[in-house]
Image (cartoon, rainbow, N blue to C red):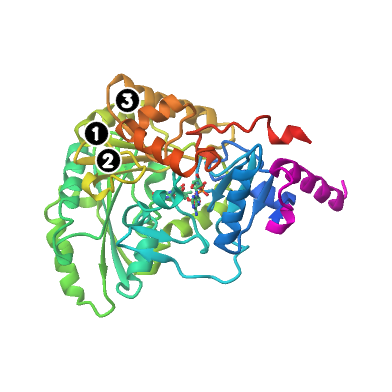
Amino acid sequence: MAPKLLLVLAICRLIIIVGLTLNPTDLNLNTDQHHLESASTDFGKLTRSEPIAVLNPTSTADIAKLVKLAYESPRGFAVSARGHGHSINGQSQTANGVVVQMSGPGTTTPVAPLVSEKLMYVDVWVVSFGLTCFEPPLVWARTQIVDRLFIPFGWWDAVERRDQWSGVRWIRVLYSNFSAFTHDQEYLISLHDQPQSQKFDYIEGFVIVDEGLINNWRSSFFSPNNPVKITSLGAGGNVLYCLEITKNYHQRANVEAIDQEVEALLSKLNYIPASMFTTDLPYVDFLDRVHTAELKLRSKGLWEVPHPWLNLFVPKSRIDDFDKGVFKGILGNKTSGPILIYPMNKNKWDEKSSVVTPNEDVFYLVALLRSALDNGEETLTLKHLSDENSKILNFCKESKIEVKQYLPHYTTQKEWMEHYGDKWPQIYRRKMEFDPRYILATGQRIFNPSFGSDPRSSW
Ligand SMILES: Cc1cc2nc3c(=O)[nH]c(=O)nc-3n(C[C@H](O)[C@H](O)[C@H](O)COP(=O)(O)OP(=O)(O)OC[C@H]3O[C@@H](n4cnc5c(N)ncnc54)[C@H](O)[C@@H]3O)c2cc1C
C-alpha cells in the first residue's frame, strides 16, 4: 500500500479511537512501520503487541496531553511508557493504544537527569536509557532504582562517583561448598556500614553448572591467560559457585595499601585457594562491562534471541533447599546462560516501592538469565527453558519456599494479589487515585482496562 494511504488510514484509526476530540497530528504520533515494529517487541522476545501509534515526546507537556486525551476519549485507550524495552514479558507493550518512547530520538535537547535524594526520585525521562519501573503512579515506581537496581548496571555509580574512582580491582574466587559460599557472601554484605577501606564495593555471585559458562556474558570477567577448568580445581561435584568482588580506588591510590586492604578482606573467606583470579581495569570499563558483553554476543548473533529470564528473591533460611532442589536438581548440567546469586539486606529496600521482598532480614537474588536457541539441541529451546522455569516455581511452591519474583510476570489479578500480599490494598488505592480507568502500563497485566470493543476493530 502506498505510504500516503497508510498514513491516512492510521490517522483515521486514531481519530476514531480518540473520539474526534483532537487531531492526532497535533501530538506528532508516529504510525510508520519502523516505529510500530520497535515498540511491539522487547528484550524477552516472548510476546509481541503492536500499538496503534508511538509518541516520541519532546516535552512533558506532550505526555500530559496524550494521557488527558486517553482519559477524556469516550472509549479510552492505553498509554504505555517504554524505556529501552528491556523487559521480558511485554511490560512496555500495548495493542490497545499508544506507546510513549521515553528514550532515544524524539527529544531535542539532552537534559541532565534530575535527582532528588531527599524525595527519593530520579527523573531521567529525557535521557537515553531505561528504568526499572513497575506500576503507576509512574514517579512513585521510579524511586527504588537509585541505589539498588542500577548498581549492578553501574549507572547510578557512574552518576554519583564518576569523578571519584578511577580504577577497580576485580577479583573472582570459586567454591564447591555452597554453605561456605553463602556464609562468605553474607559476611561480606554485613560489612556495608564499615569504613570504605574495610569492605568491598561490589559483591555478586554465579552458579556454574556448565563449564562453558565460567566466563559467561554477565560476568564478562575474561581472563585469557588463566583459563579455568572446573575439573582441574579438584573440587569434586559438578556445581561450582563463583564469588565476584571489587575494590575501587583513586587515581593516586597507594597500590600497597589497596593490596593490603584486599588481602585482609580475602583472608576471612573460605574459597578454593587455587581458584583466585584478579584483574585491574579502569572504573568506567567495569561499569560498562555488560555492554561490552552485549556487543560480543551481538556479533555472534546471540543477543536477538528469546530470553525466558526468571528472577527470584529467595529467603535466606531456604537458600540451601533451593540449591539442592534447583542448582543441583532441576537444572541438570546445562544452564543456557548465567545464573546470578547474591544476598541482600532487606533494610536497604524501600518498603514504599512496589517491589515485594521476602519477609526475612537477608534474602537472595537468584537470576536465571537464559537465552533460548533454535539450533536443534532440545535443552536450549524456548520450550525446554520455559518448562524448567515452571518446574522451579512449582518446586518452590511444593517445598513452601516463599520466593518472590523480581520484575514479576503474572497473568491474572489473583496471582498479582498473592504476589503483593499486604501491599495490595495500597497498590489498588494508588491505582484508583492515579489511573482509575486502568489505561497506564497495561502491559504489566495487573489491572485490565475495558475499552468497550477493541479499538482496532472499529475501523
Ligand atoms: C541485559 C540486561 C541486564 C539487566 N540487568 C539488570 C540488573 O543488573 N539489575 C536490575 O535491576 N535489572 C536489570 N535488568 C532488568 C531491567 O532493569 C528491567 O528490565 C527494566 O525494566 C528495563 O528498563 P526499560 O526502561 O528498558 O523497561 P521497559 O521494558 O521499556 O519498561 C518496563 C516497564 O516500565 C515502564 N516504563 C518504562 N519507562 C518508563 C518511564 N520513563 N516512566 C514510567 N514508566 C516507565 C513501562 O511501561 C513498563 O511497564 C537487566 C535487563 C537486561 C536486558
Asked if labels 2 and 1 touch by Cβ distance under 8 angstroms, the answer is yes
- CA gap between label 1 and label 3 equals 11 Å
Asked if residue 376 is among those painted magenta in the image, a careful observer would answer no
Amino acid type at image mark 1: Ile
- CA gap between label 1 and label 2 equals 7 Å
Q: Earlier in the sequence, mark 1 or mark 3?
A: 1
Asked if residue 22 is among those painted magenta in the image, a careful observer would answer yes
Given residues 248 and 212, the one toward you in this image is: 248
Q: Position of residue 370 (x, y in %)?
A: 46, 39
Q: Which residue lies most toward the bottom here?
A: 252
Give the image quarter of residue 405. Answer: top left
Asked if labels 2 and 3 touch by Cβ distance under 8 angstroms, the answer is no
| The label number, if any, that marks residue 364 in the structure image | 2
Residue under the image location 33 percent in, 68 percent down: 160
On screen, residue 189 versus residue 429, left or right, reads: left
Counting other residues with Cα less than 10 Å from the Cα at mark 2, is it few (<14), some (14-19), or many (20 or more)?
Answer: many
Q: Position of residue 179 (x, y in %)?
A: 18, 37
Mark 3, secondary structure of its residue: helix
Magenta span: 1-28
Amino acid type at image mark 3: Cys
Give the image quarter of residue 246. Answer: bottom left
Residue under the image location 44 percent in, 39 percent down: 431
Given residues 85 and 454, the one toward you in this image is: 454
Residue that numbered label 3 is attached to: 396
| The label number, if any, that marks residue 319 in the structure image | 1
On screen, residue 77 versus residue 381, left or right, reads: right
Q: Earlier in the sequence, mark 3 or mark 2?
A: 2
Q: Position of residue 193 (x, y in %)?
A: 15, 58
Residue under the image location 44 percent in, 61 percent down: 123
| The label number, if any, that marks residue 250 in the structure image | none
Mark 1, secondary structure of its residue: helix
